[in-house]
Amino acid sequence: MKIGVIGGGAAGYFAAIHASGKGNAVTIFEKSPKLLSKVKVSGGGRCNVTHRPMEISKLVKNYPRGEKFLKKVFRHFKCEDTIEWFESRSVPLKTENDGRVFPCSDDSQSIINALQVEANKLGIQVKTSTGIKEIQLKGDSYLLISDRGEFLVDSLTIAGGGYPKVDGYAFMNKLKHQIISPIPSLFTFNTPQEPIKKLMGISMPNTQVKIEGTKLNYQGPLLITHWGVSGPAVLKLSAFGAQWLFDQKYQARAIINWNADFSEQKYFEHLTQYSKSHPNRKVSNYPLFEIPTRLWEYLCDKSEVDLDQTFNSLSKKQINKLVQNLFCHILNINGKTTFKEEFVTAGGISIDEVNPETLESKYHPNLYFAGEVLNIDGITGGFNFQAAWSTGYLAGKSSVKNTI
Ligand SMILES: Cc1cc2nc3c(=O)[nH]c(=O)nc-3n(C[C@H](O)[C@H](O)[C@H](O)COP(=O)(O)OP(=O)(O)OC[C@H]3O[C@@H](n4cnc5c(N)ncnc54)[C@H](O)[C@@H]3O)c2cc1C
């Protein structure tokens, strides 16, 4: 049986590797001269290959699109399987405090080497600079048209990744699968009019960030940058709010609670109490609520608190304003910036038309999809590669099952 895989990325390699055996001839078709190029640059060159293992019901919560579908896929291959797969191929992995898993070498090349050694061992053919321009249905087989010739395969896995525009999917037009229009996910917020940018470099470990007028509301670290705000809380919002923010043309208002351990009432009580217990301390010299000095001074300034003022001289109005700025700090978002450590597209092949138990097309036998080409995407933290490994594994295994 001739098995074709379109795309020499993470999902394509995993699909090809797991489709090998039983005398199958497996070929990867890659349009660029380079293989596994996203793996190479991923995680700042370190490759955040997966996330610390957790229950599947929790794991799928990290996918704004594809949660239910992946519940079934992960039963076949999950984070612990990824760890086992690489470690058993001499790539020791380490888990960082936030749960992200990297090769101990801190070098994505270790992951690339493991995949390429395995592919070579299995005799997988790799055709680089061979972009597939069209897929034609020939009975139960598939004819792949490229500038480098035509290839007839009995089984095909499409693992071409995400495309920023819908035209990218045109080579699959004849398959008549529905394409959900691609939009960006995982980006940071620009706040060009906000003076807060002058505090760039400050990070807060546990903020709560909401988007006004929506239910979007996430907790986590936040980083002030020279263009706006970034960090896990913002990236999570950008992923779960990808469609809404796209529709609003990335114009919105973010509401920040700088320390999510405190409610509005708790802020108020603590400030009032502190004013009584330390009446003569200068407000600017004693940042409360674990707020860094520069941010505290900025918030005091916004609340019209004089730098020389003592706690006992704070008026009720000033305390209320300070509480407001601590609990409901409003930032006007105007635009977005690509998160260079990890960028994915939401959108792609509609998962309603793909069987989650096999990754096979519901329309065409022996046609499979894997990786970011599907309308599946995760938040930052290794979840996108995990989806690529799991869908690649299942697509590959399923194509072998159908081998007589
Ligand atoms: C800078 C960056 C850093 C990232 N870091 C991380 C990270 O640390 N952890 C994480 O989990 N995720 C990360 N991601 C996301 C992750 O890289 C992707 O989700 C993952 O690579 C998707 O794998 P894939 O195989 O589906 O697609 P891709 O890796 O995009 O591979 C698809 C391949 O198919 C080829 N192709 C496309 N169309 C055709 C065609 N018609 N014919 C032939 N070949 C074709 C492409 O050239 C490409 O090589 C990062 C992404 C970026 C951009």
Image (tube, rainbow, N blue to C red):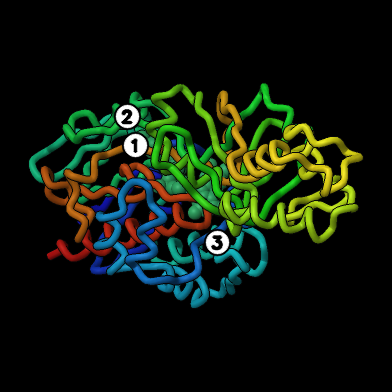
- The correct choice, above or below, for 192 with respect to 395 in the image is above
Some atom of ligand 1 lies within 8 Å of the CB belonging to the residue at label 2: no
Give the secondary structure at mark 2. Answer: strand
| Closer-to-camera residue (252/81) | 252
Q: As drawn, is 312 to the left or to the right of 205?
A: right
Q: Nearer the N terminus, badge 2 or badge 1?
A: 2
The mark found on residue 111 in the picture is 3
At x 66% / y 40%, what residue is drawn? 320
The answer to whether the residue labelled 2 contacts the one labelled 1, judged by CB atoms less than 8 Å apart, is yes
Amino acid type for the residue under numbered disc 1: Gly
Q: As drawn, is 237 to the left or to the right of 313?
A: left
| Closer-to-camera residue (394/300) | 300
Give the secondary structure at mark 3. Answer: helix
The mark found on residue 110 in the picture is none
At x 58% / y 40%, what residue is drawn? 328
Give the secondary structure at mark 1. Answer: strand
Separation of residues labelled 2 and 1 (CA atoms): 5 Å
Res. 35 in view: no
Amino acid type for the residue under numbered disc 2: Ser
The mark found on residue 181 in the picture is 2
Residue 49 in the image: state x and y as whole percent. 52, 60
Residue 358 in the image: state x and y as whole percent. 20, 59
Separation of residues labelled 2 and 3 (CA atoms): 31 Å
Residue 53 in the image: state x and y as whole percent. 45, 71
Of tags 1 and 3, the one toward the viewer is: 1
Q: Residues within 10 Å of mark 1 (few under 14, many from 20)?
A: many
The mark found on residue 347 in the picture is 1
Q: In which image quadrant can residue 182 be found?
A: top left
